[in-house]
Amino acid sequence: MANIFEKCLYLYPDTQGITYWQARRDGTPWQDPYDGLIWEVKDIPKPTKQELDTLDDLMVENTLKQRDEEKRKKERNKLYAEKLDVVARYQEETTKDINLTWNNYLDQLEEKSKQLK
């Protein structure tokens, strides 16, 4: 189940100034989890509890996972672009399959790596 903070990240990805405390300073839980949301963002109004409650938890969780995976792959792709042996093998593979993208090639390498484990 998505929490208040995750729902805010879903609505406003990469926004700075959002903090969420799951409990009070003394460790006791909030009567309402929305009370733990600290909104320091100046240019975006704080979402209401009702706005956050209407979001589908599964959709929020899946979208956040997808964003994380896209970010991971973007960083992976950049890292491997600097490895000349991998780039050379990719270029060789594209002579066999002109539709092969860099991202798909690295996905294939990851899949092969998983199979070898």
Image (cartoon, grey):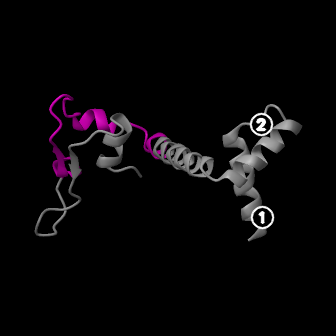
Q: Nearer the viewer, residue 101 or 79?
A: 79
Across and down, in percent, residue 20 comes to 23, 52
Across and down, in percent, residue 106 comes to 69, 49
Task: Look at the image and say whether residue 52 sits in the magenta stretch.
Answer: yes
Instruction: Examine the rendering and report whether any part of residue 42 can be seen.
Output: yes
In this rendering, would 41 be left or right of 82? left
Q: Residue at x 11, y 65 (%)?
A: 25
Q: Are marks 2 and 1 in contact (CB under 8 Å)?
A: no
Please state which amino acid type lies under the numbered disc 1: Gln
In the picture shown, does residue 42 fall above or below 88?
above
The quadrant in which residue 7 appears is top left
Which of labels 2 and 1 is toward the front? 2
Q: Nearer the viewer, residue 107 or 60?
A: 107
Q: Nearer the viewer, residue 12 or 25?
A: 12
Name the residue beneath numbered marker 2.
100
Residue at the front extreme, as displayed: 84
**Which quarter of the rendering shows the C terminus?**
bottom right
In this rendering, would 33 be left or right of 99? left
- Magenta residues span 32-61
Q: Residue at x 72, y 63 (%)?
A: 114
Across and down, in percent, residue 5 comes to 30, 48
Name the residue beneath numbered marker 1.
115
Instruction: Examine the rendering and report whether any part of residue 54 can be seen.
Output: no
First in residue order: circle 2 vs circle 1 = 2
Q: Which mark is residue 30?
A: none
Mark 1 Cα within 10 Å, few/some/many (few <14, many 20+)?
few
Task: Look at the image and say whether residue 80 sits in the magenta stretch.
Answer: no
Q: Secondary structure at mark 1?
A: helix
Q: Secondary structure at mark 2?
A: loop
Q: Nearer the viewer, residue 115 or 65?
A: 115
